[in-house]
Image: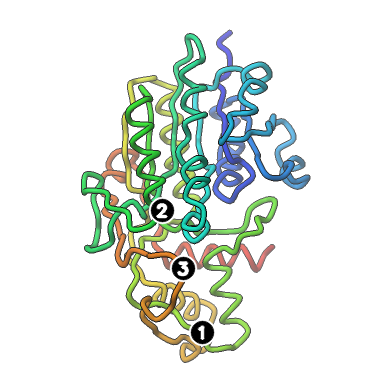
Amino acid sequence: MMRKKRVLVVGGTGYLGQHVLQGFSEIQATSPCDLAFTHHSNPPPPALLTAFPHLLSFHLDLKTGQGFQAISQTFGPPDVVINCAALSVPRACEMDPATSMSVNVPSSLVNWLLSLEGSNSLLIHLSTDQVYEGVKSFYKEDDETVPVNVYGKSKVAAEQFISEKCSNFAILRSSIIFGPQTVSPVPKSLPIQWIDGVLSKGNTSEFFHDEFRCPVYVKDVVAAVLALSKRWISDGKQTKLLLNVGGPDRVSRLQMAETVADIRGYNPSLIKSVSASSVDRGVKSPADISMDITKLVQTLDVTPTSFRDGVRWTLSTEVKS
């Protein structure tokens, strides 16, 4: 009998990591695989272990590589690795560039994969739209990367490292990821829930009208990860892919807030339009890093959710929960 394929989610307790684990768990009946995940700062939350009782979990320090040996011995060489782990708060990266580089450039992960004898694995690595300079709309994958902050620079360095070292990889340049809360709620504020919380109090709030992104619904990111994993597991053809992973809509923070207000029925006069230059965030932020997602749609045959529908589904899930 053929052994089940092994899938390892690095950073499985984070927001995207938990959604990826959920995605793989939901397809076990049709595409069974052995699934494991790593965690770093805290032990896996009980709610996560209860939701996915059959999963193996491993403590892992990406800076030192401590924990890979246990994965090799207990789980075995993975067929697919999804790297969701990152230091992704731009301001924190700006304050500590060395830590940002050591976590965001997954050198210990890649070197471990290269050390596994006879192993042939696909690395799916989450990058960011912040690799782009932000001086035009709808960046394509082959546009020059000119990051304006340390976070973006660390992600460009990661992309270069992976491209040079790995035989098989898919780098996903993700925009702002939004959607419902995770099985075990994450402490960081989620974009739509944060906007909803602010507006629900009835206080006037400021939103930037001149910074543009293509926010992507979390389940669309998971769909891309699942499509890449299934394809690799079924045919094992050499994969060297770079994909923009965004939603179909270019929106400002102001438009994001207006969408939430419209769906919830909040008073639109609560939303005050301001320029991004009016606030010092302690980090330079690119003005327009909207992305062209033609390659994503054509390569993986996925149709990303419109921003409005994603917000509607996110808010309806929050009401139910």
- Furthest toward the bottom, the residue is 269
Circle 3: element type: loop
Circle 2: element type: helix
Alpha carbon distance from label 2 to label 3: 12 Å
Q: Earlier in the sequence, mark 3 or mark 1?
A: 1
Total numbered badges shown on the rendered structure: 3
Question: Are the residues tagged 2 and 3 within 8 Å (C-beta)?
Answer: no
Q: Which residue is mark 3?
A: 282
Q: Is residue 252 left or right of residue 38?
A: left
Residue positioned 61% across, 75% down in the render: 197
For the residue carrying disc 3, how many other residues have a C-alpha within 10 Å: few (<14), some (14-19), or many (20+)? few
Q: Position of residue 149 (x, y in %)?
A: 38, 57
Indicate which label's residue lies in the foreground, 3 or 1. Answer: 3
Residue positioned 24% across, 54% down in the render: 139
Q: Of the residues shown, which amino acid type is indicated by label 2?
A: Val
Residue positioned 28% across, 61% down in the render: 134
Indicate which label's residue lies in the foreground, 2 or 1. Answer: 2
Alpha carbon distance from label 2 to label 1: 28 Å
Q: Which residue is mark 2?
A: 150
Q: Is residue 285 left or right of residue 118?
A: left
Above or below — where is 216 with respect to 299? below
